[in-house]
Amino acid sequence: MILKEMIGSHTYTFNSIKEVLAKASEQKSGDTLAGVGACSKMERVAAKEVLARLTVGEITENPAVPYDKDSVTRIIIDDLDRAAFEKVKNVTMADLREWILAAQNGDIILEICRGLTSEVIAATAKLMGNLDLMYASKKLHIEATCNTTIGGENVLASRLQPNHPIDDGNGVIASTLEGLSYGVGDAVLGLNPAIDTVESTINIWNMLGNLRDTFQIPTQTCVLSHVTTQMNALKTGAKADLCFQSIAGSQAALDAFGVTVEMLEEANAMFRAEGSAKGPNVMYFETGQGSELSSNAHFGADQGVMENRCYGLARHYKPFLVNTVVGFMGPEYVFDAKELLRAGLEDVYCGHMHGLPMGCDCCYTNHMPTDQNDIENLFILLAAAGCHYVMGLPQGDDVMLMYQSTGYHDVAAVRELTKKTAIPEFDAWLQANGIWVNGKPGENFGDPTIFIR
């Protein structure tokens, strides 16, 4: 295993596979902040050359965090399909990349992916251009079932996010009805609570559940409070379809979230046994490049590798939804439009390679040098890449979390442009209510008064 490369008269030497992976990454402000990114474009090229020669086996044997010190590493390694790994352990990253791009059957790629660690999947992304990421991602079809099934052919789903600064019921309902009138909400009616208590969680569960049942909406409900809050709410007899938690790529970073893998295991079992979901996939996870660095729990690895380790953890629980909140961490981690676009394409590709129903919150904070045009560009690229779902917010503005994302109207516009639909049962409901008809807005599109006449 040779970790050096000569370019011209200069030899670039790397001390570990972890360093090679970090310096082969496209530029991200978070990697620069952590001091792990390439110091020059030439060093980045040298690292990519070294990475291209490494084998699946060599990277697998060198996880970002040691097996005996990290519960996330243990899950990733223990979940490997050993038969699939044996088929590719001697394959170089360069050859694996070429095979992924050349393969015509996405199911065959996914079979091999079961034998790839998160570090290996991250490595393939580092050798791909943006179009490569889109081309490969589009091939991979992953389905999951809660009340409805996400991941069907030519489906672009959406999460309706009716956040309110004080969780006011009237405000939440008004925003939800408006979103439904634009055809948003087939992935989930999911609210980030301003107040993380059992009582508030139950109130919003009931509010969204009653709304769903009153109008017979084929979708899922979720309140994005802490996993322990949701478990305690479930113990009271209250019901919801999905259990949410933000996750991270190392045990130390999970500790910062107040979460353990055992806790996630318990929540998954509880919601499958006692929740209101009809199907087996009951977990909803959110991630975001840079979260491990923010808690000093990245162990010298780059944020792309750590993000992939989130996906390795997520696939253990067979979730219904996984969502990368790609610009929410701010410019310290993803600086500008170029980095934002790259991170979003990487995350959806890598999520698909892990066999996950992957969504993206195409978003930014107000202190980033980005604007709505940038996230609209990312949105249309992700739709072409087969992204499972995106967010729908009133005018793309979250007045509780104070960040900018995609609006209800954006979802409708991109569906029409790309000739994609909502999840079939939800699409049928939209057509029955005159909201979306034959791939275009219907007579009741954008008119929430149809629900209160």
Image (spheres, grey):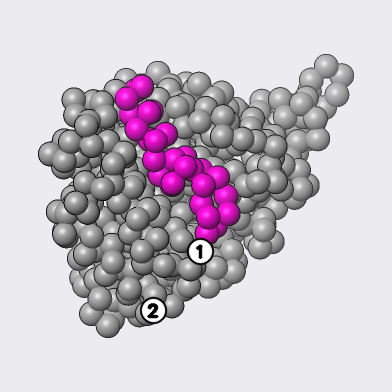
Seen at 26% across and 48% down, the residue is 449
Residue 281 lies left or right of residue 92; in this view the side is: left
In the displayed structure, 355 sits above or below 268; it is above
Mark 1 or mark 2, whichever is nearer to me: 1
Q: Where residue 201 sits in the image (x, y, percent)?
A: 37, 72
Q: Amino acid at mark 1?
A: Pro
Q: Where residue 275 sits in the image (x, y, percent)?
A: 23, 68
Residue 409 is covered by the magenta coloring? yes
Numbered tag placed on residue 328 in the rendering:
none
Q: Quadrant of residue 372?
A: top right
Quadrant (top left, top right, bottom left, bottom right) of the N terminus = top right
What is the crowding at mark 2: few (fewer than 14 residues within 10 Å), some, or many (at least 20)?
Answer: some
* CB within 8 Å, label 1 to label 2: no
Q: Residue furthest front?
A: 453
**Numbered range of the magenta stretch:** 391-418
Residue 294 lies left or right of residue 398; in this view the side is: right
Residue 235 lies left or right of residue 200; in this view the side is: left
Q: Quadrant of residue 49?
A: top right
Q: Where residue 453 sits in the image (x, y, percent)?
A: 19, 51
Q: Which residue is mark 1?
A: 165
- The foreground one among 217 and 279 is 217
Q: Secondary structure at mark 1?
A: loop
Seen at 16% across and 40% down, the residue is 433
Residue 262 is covered by the magenta coloring? no
In the displayed structure, 419 sits above or below 239; it is above
Q: Secondary structure at mark 2?
A: helix
Residue 78 lies left or right of residue 308; in this view the side is: left
Q: Which residue is mark 2?
A: 198
Q: Amino acid at mark 2?
A: Val
Seen at 59% across and 69% down, the residue is 256
Q: CA distance from mark 1 to mark 2?
A: 18 Å
Seen at 80% across and 30% down, the residue is 40
